[in-house]
Each structure stands twice: as C-alpha cells, then as structure tokens.
Image: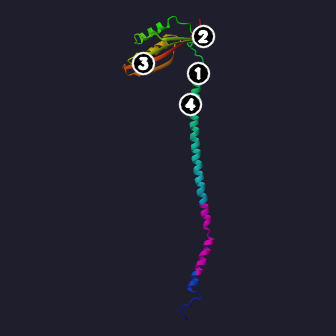
Amino acid sequence: MSPESPSPLTDEARLRMFRRASDAERSNRPRWMVMLAGLIFAAALVYALLGWFDRRDALDALRGARAGDSNLTLVLSEIERLREPPETGDMGPFPPLDTPQTELQRLATRAGRDTLDPPTARESEVNERISRRTFTYRSVRHPSPEGLLRWLDSVERGIIGMRVQYIDLKPNRARDGWELSVTFSRLETSS
C-alpha cells in the first residue's frame, strides 16, 4: 500500500476551492440586512428621542403659559376690583373745602414739618357738576423720607377725598436731606 496518494488537486486549486466555499458561505449569511436593520433602528431611536425632547419643551412652555395666564387673571381681577366704585363712598365728589391750604399746613405741622410754601392750586372741570381741585407743592424738604411720607399719609387720612396724584421723592445731597414734590387731588361738587 502506498502511504498517501497524492491529491489530484494542486495547492492553487485547493486555495481557489476554499475561496469559493467561503464566498458561498458569506452569501448565505446576508450581513447587509442585519446592518440595514441596525441602521433603521438607530434612526428610529434618534427620532424617538427628538420627539421626547420636543414634547418635554412643549409641556414646559404650556406650564409657563398657564402660569402667565393665572397671573394675568389675577391682575385683570385686581383691575376690575379697582374699577368698581368703592363701598365706603369716599371717592367723591365731596362738598368744597373752605380752607384746604390751612388744613394741609396743619397736617404738615402735625407730621413734623414747620412751614410750607403755599401750594399751586388749580381747578379743572370734570363735568358740569364735578370739578377736580389740585394742590401742588414743589421742593418740600425734610431730613428724613419718613417725615414726608407721614405727612402724605396724614393728608389722605385727614382730608376726606384728598388723594396723592403725583409724587417725586429724591435725596437732596446739597442740604443733607430729602426733597419732595407732590400733587394732591380732590373731586368736589361744582358750585
């Protein structure tokens, strides 16, 4: 017996045969389909994450809008409340005061302010039965803002219907104190 019979195939032919078998095995396992499925899955995952982030942003915007709406509702209800006539009936018109400047001076003295220059008084007609009287004080000085604000408060409390229409309070560095310009207003019945 002969040891091993030589193969009728040469090494080169055997190598070609192995290559063909390897190519056939690869064609039976379609890697491109698996890669395409993975790519589609990755794209779907990215799309789902973008949708989730957009939803979260939309919910945050909705919460902010709802909070703004509730704040707006509160502000509108406050405006409506302020537009309604007061139940106390102290908004006027009131009978005319005989000596408003004297009363304003008396309240200033009580609040700690000795003398005031006379105010600029004006009267304007609101309609045929009501007029608005204004009293403007310019450059009222005091060492502390509390004294000036105490005077404003005592005027509103002490003279029925008198309201602060305009106020400008600022520090007066040259005189080491405070300076106030104020306009008081009162609705009165026309005479």
Residue 23: say if magenta: yes
- Name the residue at 43% across, 22% down: 170
* Mark closest to the chain's N terminus, 3 or 1: 1
Residue 166: say if magenta: no
Query: What is the CA distance from the residue labelled 1 to the residue labelled 2?
Result: 23 Å
Which residues make up the magenta segment? 16-38
Residue 22, how many percent across, how many down? 59, 75
Say what amino acid the circle numbered 4 marks.
Answer: Asn
Query: What is the CA distance from the residue labelled 4 to the residue labelled 2?
Result: 36 Å
Q: Which residue is mark 1?
A: 81
Image quadrant containing the C terminus: top right
* Mark closest to the chain's N terminus, 1 or 2: 1
Q: Can you tell which quarter of the image residue 130 is in?
A: top right
Crowd around label 2: few <14 · some 14–19 · many ≥20 (10 Å): some
Residue 179 numbered mark, or none: 3
* Mark closest to the chain's N terminus, 4 or 3: 4
SS type, badge 3: strand
Image quadrant containing the N terminus: bottom right
